[in-house]
Image: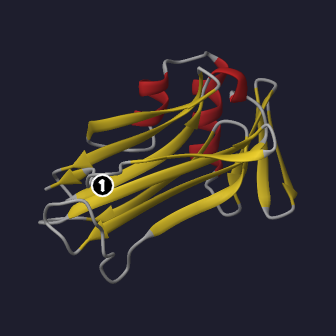
Amino acid sequence: MQKTKMTLGLTIVATLGLGLAQPSGASTATTATAGRAHAVAAPAAARIAASCTGRLVHRWPLRHANTTIGELVLYWNAANKTNCARMNHLGPTRGVRLRTAVWLAACRERRGSTCTPVAGSPKAEDGVYASYAGPVTVQAAGRCVHAAGDIYYQGAKRHVDSSPWLAHCA
C-alpha cells in the first residue's frame, strides 16, 4: 500500500509503513522503489546504486564524537561521462528527519587541490530528509570534480568533503 502526501514542498511517500522524504516532483515509481529498498534494509551500496549509476569511486565517512553519522558517496558513469553524489544518513541519523545537503561541481582544474566550477555546475540539493540528500549529477568528461555534504545533527552543521584534493578526475 502506498500513500503520497504533499507537505512543505516535499512529497512524503509511505511504502510498507516507512516514510521517505523526496523533493517535490520525484517520480512515484522511483520513490516507491527506494522505499522498498529501505523497507527490506538493503545494504547502503545497493540503495545508492539504485539512484547513482556507474562505479563507486569514493566514500567519505562523516563522523561526530567518534560515531559515523553519515557518508558522502561519489559514482562515475563512464558511459554517459557523469559523476553522481549522494549524502547518506548512517547510524544515529538513519531514519531521522534532519536537514541534509549534498554538493557536486565539475572543476576547470584537471589536478590539484582547488576547484573552480565550470558553467552549469555546481549541482546541489538541500532539504529535510530521513535517509539521504541527492543524488546530484554533473557532466565531467575530461574534468575533475569536488564533492561535499552536510548533516545538521545535535544542533550544528556536520560537514564532509573531498578536500584537500579533487575527488575524481576522468
On screen, residue 33 above or below 105:
above
- By what rule are the colours in the image chosen? secondary structure
Identify the residue at horizontal 68%, vertical 27% (top origin): 94
Q: Nearer the viewer, residue 116 or 101?
A: 116
Q: Amino acid at mark 1?
A: Asn
**Foreground residue, 166 or 58?**
166
Name the residue furthest bottom: 119
* Left or right of 30, for residue 52: left
Q: Quadrant of residue 155?
A: top right
Image x and y of residue 104, in percent = 41, 60
Comparing 117 with 9, the one in front is 117
Q: Position of residue 124 (x, y in %)?
A: 52, 64
Q: Is residue 148 visible?
A: yes
Q: Nearer the viewer, residue 130 or 115?
A: 115
Q: Position of residue 47 (x, y in %)?
A: 49, 30
Residue at horizontal 17%, vertical 60%? Answer: 112
Instruction: Report the residue marked by disc 1.
Output: 83
Q: In which quadrant is the C terminus drawn?
A: bottom left
Q: Is residue 124 above or below residue 165?
A: below
Label 1 SS: strand
